[in-house]
Amino acid sequence: MTEVERSRVVTTAALDRLDPQARAAARGWSDIKIRNMFIIPTILFLIVFNIFPLLYSLGYSFTDFRASVNAPASFIGLENYRRLLSDPNIWRNFTVTAKYVIVSVGGQMIVGFGVALLLNRAFPFKGFVTTLLLLPMMMSMAVVGLFWKLLYDPSWGIINYALGLGRFDWLSNPDMALYAVAITDIWMWSPFVMLLSLAGLSAVPKHLYEAAAIDRASSWYTFTRITLPLVSPLLLIALIFRTMEAFKSFDLPFIMSGQPTTEVIAIRLYKMAFQEWQTGLSCALAYIMLIVVIAITNVYIKYLNRVKER
């Protein structure tokens, strides 16, 4: 063995005796380099696919640009925003969206939390039953919409048969179409609320229930003073996520019903952008939606922080 090979063997043996962090530093791979190797590509990915389109569309919202016309965009300032905020049809779409959010999210919170209370106990095949209940939220929105559209069908739909309503057309009725779509959304996303609620219920200390039982506290008192306050942070998190998703919901209302009473703001945005080709105006509407969602979310987060401080 030559002197160079002997030196290389000694150096390798010395490195092997070091801990992984010191070994990486000795070979030129410090923690900072390893961290940057993973973080920098992620930052670049976010800039290219998230931040750049946001800024690009923000610029278009101040122009009269139309994607269907081969002409340069002209800067018109806040005209698009003034035009949208003074349009009564846009306010009608926001009203429909608000009604849809209240019905669907409210139903999801009630059903999801109620099912979680039922599952928060030991019984045979609990894991299997929980997995089955989680299946709806794992399905495609398009598949769920078409599936429930068949269930609501006035000719062979099973819902009319089960309720004895004859040939009642849920999705063509202007008074019931929005509620029919909301019921579908409740069926699909209640398992999400149930999952978060189960996580909160399983984390409640058992000794609190034992102390309440020793003091002969009623079931209602135990629920309102122990269960609900300790689970409420996770319920608020579920409420935040589901409100944001329901506010920009597009798939289910678009697939299931074409009624004006189900034209939520996301459908109006789609028509404005890809049927009327008012690109600049649609970008402005998208940012109005973003501002509304951020405002609602901030209200929820402030209340969540208050709950956590108690």
Image (tube, helix red, strand yellow):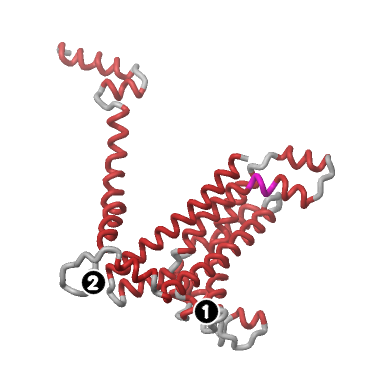
Secondary structure under the numbered disc 2 in the rendered image: loop
Q: Which mark is residue 150?
A: 1
Q: Earlier in the sequence, mark 2 or mark 1?
A: 2
Q: Disc 2 marks which amino acid?
A: Arg
Residue shown at 81% from the left, 49% from the top:
218
- What residue is disc 2 on? 66
> As rendered, which of 237 and 290 lies closer to the eye?
290
> As rendered, which of 11 and 163 lies closer to the eye?
163
Residue 92 in picture, x, y percent from top left: 46, 74
Q: Which quadrant is the C terminus positioned in?
A: top right
**Residue 36 located left or right of residue 308:** left
Residue shown at 57% from the left, 82% from the top:
157
Residue shown at 27% from the left, 74% from the top:
277
Q: Which mark is residue 75?
A: none
Quadrant housing residue 248:
bottom left
Residue 215 in picture, x, y percent from top left: 83, 41
Q: Which residues are magenta?
A: 227-231
Residue 298 in picture, x, y percent from top left: 48, 51
Residue 243 in picture, x, y percent from top left: 51, 59
